[in-house]
Image (cartoon, helix red, strand yellow):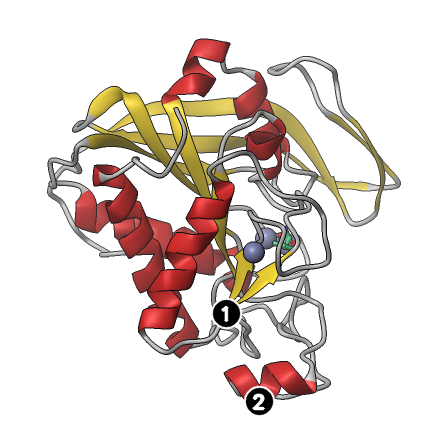
Amino acid sequence: GQPGRTDPLEFDIVEWRFGFPIVMASTAVGLDLADSPGTTVRLKVDAATTVGRTKNLIADSRWGKKGEIVMVGAHLDGVPEGAGINDNGSGSAAILETALKLAKVPTKHKLRFAFWGAEELGLLGSEQYVAGLSQAEKDKIRLYLNFDMVASPNDVTFLYDGDDSDAEGAGAGPAGSAEIEKLFEKYYAKRRLGFEGTDFDGRSDYGPFIANGIPSGGIFTGAEGIKTEEQAAKFGGTAGAPYDPCYHAACDGITNINAAALERNSKAIAYATTFYAYDLSTIPD
Ligand code: PHE
Ligand code: ZN
Ligand code: ZN
Ligand code: ZN
C-alpha cells in the first residue's frame, strides 16, 4: 500500500457489510451457522474473550462494463494466535497494490476487489457474500481469483488445480477454471519459474464461488504441509520443513514474509487481473 496517500481512489465502496456478530474465543469448540445470510452466526465457545463484529470490504472499479465483472479476493482476517502476516497480509497487500495500480486505468471489464472477513472462522464472509447474490448478480461475475498465503517462507508456487490434472484429485473447477490455471502456468513458464497444482478443495474463499459455478483460480505458496525433496530441488528452500513454519502461530509476524515470493507472485496477480480486465474470451459466459 501507500501510507499517507490523500488522492481519492477510483473505486466505489459498494459494500461495507457488517455481516455477523462474532464471538471470538481462545477455544472455539463448534460453529453453528444460521441458515440465511445476514442473520446471526453463533460460535459455541468455552470462554469468550472478545465480542465484536466483522465485515467484508467490497470495492468496484468505476470503469468497465457492469455486466462483466472480474472479481479478485483475499481474506483480511487472521487467527488470534498471531498477526497473520503471511496468512493473509500477503494476499491482501498483493491485491490492494493491484487495485491501486489499476485504479485510474479505464479497463474494458469491471474490477471488483473483495477483502473478506471471517475466513478463518469457516469462510463466513465469502459464504455470506455469495449467498446474498441473486442469480443475475452471480452471472455477472465472470471469474473469481483468490489469493490466500502468497509469500510463505519455504514456498512452493501452487496453482489451484482447475483442470484436476496435477494435484490429488479434489475435482476440477467450474468450466473456465482450467483456463485460469493455464494462464498462470503460462505466466510462470515463460519466466522459467516452476509451479505445480494444488487441490481445488475449497479450503479458502473461492469455495463458495466454485460451489456456485463461477470459474475460479489463484496462487498459494503453502501452509502447514511439508516440502518434499523434489520441491526443494525445483523451488529451493528446505525439504522436510513446512512451507510456512509459522502457519497459524504467534510467529506469523512482520518478519514472516518471503519478499522474493511476494514480489514474484504479486506480479503474477497483477498480470492475471489486468489480462482478464481486457480479455474474457477464454472464460465461458
Ligand atoms: N485457508 C487456509 C487458511 O487461511 C489456508 C489455505 C489456503 C489452505 C489455500 C489451503 C489452500 O488458513
Ligand atoms: Zn489461516
Ligand atoms: Zn488464509
Ligand atoms: Zn492443473
User: Residue visible at 75% across and 18% down?
Assistant: 34
Q: Is residue 146 visible?
A: no
Q: Residues within 10 Å of mark 2 (few under 14, many from 20)?
A: few
The correct choice, above or below, for 19 with respect to 122 in the image is: above
Residue 226 x/y as whole percent: 72, 76
Say above or below: 174 vs 236. above
Q: Tell me what residue is drawn at x 65 percent, y 45 percent.
A: 120
Name the secondary structure under disc 1.
Answer: loop
Image-quadrant location for residue 103 = top left
Disc on the earlier residue, 2 or 1: 1
- Amino acid type, mark 2: Ala
Task: Kindly state the secondary structure of the residue where label 2 is placed.
Answer: helix
Return the residue at label 2: 233
The quadrant of the picture occupied by the N terminus is bottom left
Cβ at disc 1 under 8 Å from ligand 4: no
| Residue linked to disc 1 | 195
**Is 249 or 182 nearer to us in this picture?**
182
Query: Which residue: 64% across, 84% down?
Result: 230
